[in-house]
Image (cartoon, rainbow, N blue to C red):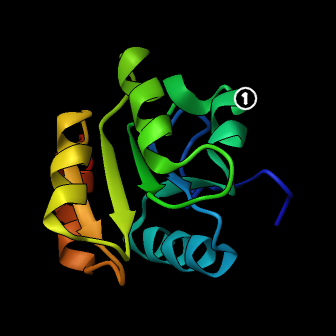
């Protein structure tokens, strides 16, 4: 995997709608990429919020999965930047899923909030609201 990003096309065209995954956990990035491949959904993975924003993918992706706790820019900061730029829907993923954190993420514009380990049905429900079927 490249230092900043890895694209997984799932056999889709270059302009196919994809999911961006932003997490500092490489194993999770690979796992979610494999999951989306199996579902026929293209994905692109980033190991930081800065890498995602610098990539130019913000306008290409249909939705973004963001880890809450990352070094550098955290998930809430990235969420705020995506919302301010009128970007795609964002789902916050975290192992720290208390009600206060959930409320904060939702008040900042997250359309979904998933506890790790991520439930595949809940993940697909979020992705389907972003135009994937």
| Number of numbered discs overlaid on the protein picture | 1
- Work out which quarter of the rendered image holds the N terminus and state it: bottom right
Residue 52 position within the rendered picture, expressed as x and y whole percent measured from the top left: 64, 39
Residue 41 position within the rendered picture, expressed as x and y whole percent measured from the top left: 43, 58
* Residue 105 in the figure: left or right of residue 94: left
In front of the other: 66 or 45: 66
* Residue 21 in the figure: left or right of residue 106: right
- Local secondary structure at mark 1: helix
Q: Residue furthest front?
A: 100
- Work out which quarter of the rendered image holds the C terminus and state it: bottom left
At a point 45% along the width and 53% down the height, the residue shown is 66
Q: Looking at the picture, does residue 43 appear above or below residue 57? A: below
| Residue of label 1 | 54
In front of the other: 38 or 75: 75
Residue 33 position within the rendered picture, expressed as x and y whole percent measured from the top left: 55, 69
Q: Quadrant of residue 123?
A: bottom left
Q: Quadrant of residue 107?
A: top left
Whether residue 50 is visible = yes
Whether residue 17 is visible = no
Q: Looking at the picture, does residue 80 appear above or below residue 18? A: above
């Amino acid at each position: 995997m490249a230092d900043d990003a890895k694209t997984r096309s799932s056999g889709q065209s270059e302009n196919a709608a994809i999911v961006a995954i932003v997490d500092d956990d490489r194993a999770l990035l690979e796992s979610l990429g494999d999951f989306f491949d199996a579902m026929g959904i293209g994905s692109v993975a980033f190991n930081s919020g800065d890498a995602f924003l610098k990539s130019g993918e913000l306008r290409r992706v249909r939705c973004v999965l963001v880890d809450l706790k990352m070094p550098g820019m955290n998930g809430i900061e990235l969420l705020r930047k995506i919302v301010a730029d009128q970007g795609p829907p964002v789902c916050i993923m975290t192992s720290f899923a208390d009600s206060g954190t959930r409320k904060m993420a939702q008040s900042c514009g997250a359309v979904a909030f998933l506890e790790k380990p991520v439930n595949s049905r809940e993940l697909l429900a979020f992705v389907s609201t972003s135009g994937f079927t």
